[in-house]
Image: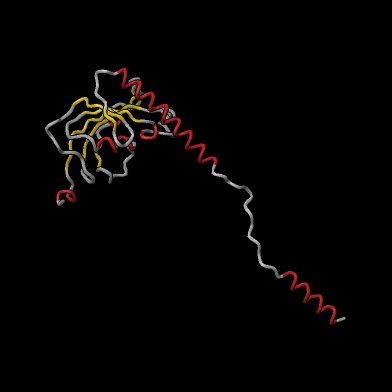
Amino acid sequence: MFKLIVFSIGILSLVSCKTPEPRRPVTHSSGSFINKSAERNKEIYNQEEMLFKQLMKNDSLQTYFASQNGFWYYYNKKDSLNNKKPKVGDTIVFTYDVKHLNGKVILSEEEVGEQHYIVDKTNQELISGIRDGIKLMKEGEVVTFLFPSYKAYGYYGIENKLGTNIPVQSTVTLKSISKTQENKQL
């Protein structure tokens, strides 16, 4: 009887010793959400681009320029003599406003106030369009930018002021550029 119990325990221990099997995922993601999101964003951009082209076509008073960063702009006041543009690390002072494409004010220059910004070094809450647009300006210039929603407030908008995925225009006045100690040595 003792031999039978020992033999049974031995057999059970051999049978129960099996390598662990990896668990299978409960759900399988095919990446379709990302693909749908990319398609939706392309569609939004194409609609906004058509809107900008129509706006520029109807505005024969201004000469619009396309930036490499995906927005358009025109000069309200241009300085053709000054060559000094902001570089990374420069401290600049500027003002700006944000408007709907029809000109209705979303954020006024007074609301925003005078901005002090270290180019590409300050973690300031500026939309990427303004951060990129400032680098195209010279001291004393006034430029109006047309920003697609992804360069403006995108999916989040501005609470109680601007909905999601809405393109905007912004007029920026670059008041001064001063080199930081780090940039003076370059």
Residue 125, image quadrant: top left
Considering the image in quadrants, where does the N terminus appear? Answer: bottom right
Residue furthest to the right in view is 1
**Of residues 138 and 113, the one drawn nearer to the viewer in this rendering:** 138
Q: Position of residue 97 (x, y in %)?
A: 29, 28
Q: Is residue 61 toward the left or the right of residue 12 in the image?
A: left
Residue 155, image quadrant: top left
Q: Position of residue 101 (x, y in %)?
A: 35, 23
Q: Position of residue 113 (x, y in %)?
A: 27, 31
**Of residues 164 and 82, the one drawn nearer to the viewer in this rendering:** 82
- Look at the image and name its color scheme: secondary structure
Q: Is residue 97 above or below residue 21?
A: above
Residue furthest to the left in view is 81
Residue in view at x 58 percent, y 46 percent: 29
Residue in view at x 54 percent, y 44 percent: 31
**Of residues 186 and 180, the one drawn nearer to the viewer in this rendering:** 186
Q: Is residue 5 above or below residue 182?
A: below
Residue 152, image quadrant: top left
Q: Is residue 174 toward the left or the right of residue 50 in the image?
A: left
**Of residues 106 and 53, the one drawn nearer to the viewer in this rendering:** 53
Q: Is residue 57 above or below residue 93?
A: above
Q: Is residue 14 toward the left or the right of residue 177 in the image?
A: right
Number of marks in the rendered image: 0
Q: Position of residue 123 (x, y in %)?
A: 32, 44
Residue in view at x 15 percent, y 49 percent: 184
